[in-house]
């Protein structure tokens, strides 16, 4: 016999309400003030967006998904503008290994080597410059070129900084509010930082690779016995004249050894093959007389090598000349040069390189070697005139 159940008026109302609800909602019997929605209880005035098992309805999932996608797109745009370089890195990381492996298999190193340009893009290259490239090795020469080409990226970063600066100046002129000016100023500082840090990074890379070139050139060739005049001996104690001479012969591998004596007779330095004599003059550079010694001894190198290579320096100048010889005083703007001092105009590292003498001797090897006194000076020469850089190496090998 079933027990008789007595219900109060309120209980009877709730029972009737419960029976009127759809079957899926009848699990939460403790939900007395509203109705069950998923695993919780919500007001009857609200619409339930969850299934009885707590899973959100499909349409709700889709709506949330669209919202999230839109939000992501909006947040990506400013990042693209602010960090263009950082975007590339994750892409590289995302590339699956399986994509890279077939490429490596398809292009073995043996196939890439013949593609390297042996002249490094120098039209009608001087045979002596080609000799310089061959000494370093074509692949190493291409590595140098790659490091030097970083300037293109630097130019781009510099342009970004200048644009940001221009926007700031414009905002100030227009009398923009303080908040806007601060925003432009902050952007300009950010662009400057990006540019400056790259300049430092690339300067280090350029100097490092030129140090490698110096290491390749250095030999244990001892200096020949060269007599130093008394004034030069006195200078030697302060300026390390003999040290510079020793470094010169180490780098040139002994070329330039026809020099027999060094003196200090006139302010303007010179070399004379008739007496195998170098006057170091009175013009000092950052390293004392090092540049002058490399320059004047460089004349001896050219003098010695003409027997083997012919007028290779005069040929280099004439091939490159963009016009007839002109007075150096006119080309350089310095009136110190005499009327008989003429040079062929071209985009040399400086105007003096184009100078020609009646006996076809030149300033090519001498100005080239004065740049081989430090890695930074070598970078300077390479950037100004790649062919001149390699011709100098060819002349000492
Ligand atoms: Zn000279």
Image: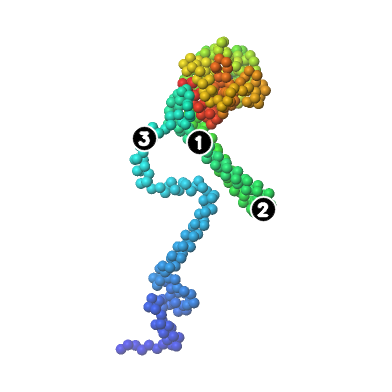
Q: Specify the label residue 111 is tagged with.
A: 3
Residue to which mark 2 is pinned = 176
- The spot of residue 395 in percent (x, y) is 49, 21
Residue to which mark 1 is pinned = 149
Q: Is residue 272 above or below residue 136?
A: above
- The spot of residue 300 in percent (x, y) is 53, 16
- The spot of residue 60 in percent (x, y) is 44, 67
Q: Specify the label residue 236 is tagged with.
A: none
Q: Which class describes the residues within 10 Å of circle 1: few (<14), some (14-19), or many (20+)?
A: few
Q: Is residue 97 above or below residue 242?
A: below
In three-dimensional space, the C-alpha distance between marks 2 and 3, rounded to whole angstroms, equals 59 Å
Q: Is residue 143 above or below residue 260?
A: below
Q: Which of marks 2 and 1 is nearer the N terminus?
A: 1
- The spot of residue 273 in percent (x, y) is 55, 12
Taking the image as drawn, is residue 153 in sight? Answer: yes
In three-dimensional space, the C-alpha distance between marks 1 and 3, rounded to whole angstroms, equals 24 Å
């Amino acid at each position: 016999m079933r027990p008789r159940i007595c219900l109060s008026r309120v209980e009877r109302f709730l029972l009737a309400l419960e029976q009127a609800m759809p079957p899926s909602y009848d699990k939460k019997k403790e939900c007395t003030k509203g109705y069950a929605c998923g695993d919780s209880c919500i007001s009857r005035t609200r619409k339930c967006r969850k299934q009885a098992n707590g899973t959100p309805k499909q349409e709700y999932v889709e709506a949330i998904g669209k919202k999230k996608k839109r939000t992501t797109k909006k947040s990506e745009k400013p990042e693209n503008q602010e960090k263009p370089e950082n975007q590339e890195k994750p892409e590289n990381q995302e590339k699956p290994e399986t994509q890279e492996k077939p490429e490596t298999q398809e292009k073995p190193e043996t196939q890439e080597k013949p593609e390297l340009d042996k002249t490094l893009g120098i039209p009608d290259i001087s045979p002596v410059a080609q000799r310089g490239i061959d000494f370093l090795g074509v692949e190493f020469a291409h590595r140098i070129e790659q490091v030097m080409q970083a300037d293109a990226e630097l130019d781009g970063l510099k342009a970004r900084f200048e644009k940001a600066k221009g926007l700031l100046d414009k905002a100030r002129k227009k009398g923009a509010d303080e908040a806007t000016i601060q925003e432009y100023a902050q952007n300009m500082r950010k662009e400057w930082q990006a540019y400056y840090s790259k300049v430092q990074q690339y300067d280090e890379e350029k100097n490092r690779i030129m140090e490698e070139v110096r290491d390749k050139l250095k030999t244990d060739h001892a200096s020949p016995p060269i007599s130093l005049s008394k004034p030069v001996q006195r200078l030697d104690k302060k300026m390390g004249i003999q040290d510079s001479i020793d470094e010169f012969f180490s780098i040139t591998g002994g070329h330039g050894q026809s020099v027999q004596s060094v003196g200090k007779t006139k302010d303007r330095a010179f070399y004379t093959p008739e007496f195998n004599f170098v006057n170091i003059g009175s013009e000092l550079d950052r390293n004392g007389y090092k540049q002058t010694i490399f320059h004047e001894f460089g004349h001896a190198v050219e003098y010695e090598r003409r027997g083997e290579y012919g007028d290779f320096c005069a040929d280099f100048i004439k091939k490159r000349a963009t016009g007839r010889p002109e007075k150096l005083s006119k080309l350089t703007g310095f009136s110190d040069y005499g009327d008989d001092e003429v040079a062929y105009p071209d985009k040399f590292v400086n105007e003096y390189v184009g100078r020609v003498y009646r006996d076809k001797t030149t300033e090519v090897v001498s100005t080239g070697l004065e740049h081989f006194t430090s890695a930074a000076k070598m970078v300077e020469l390479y950037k100004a005139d790649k062919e001149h850089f390699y011709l100098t190496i060819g002349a000492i090998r």
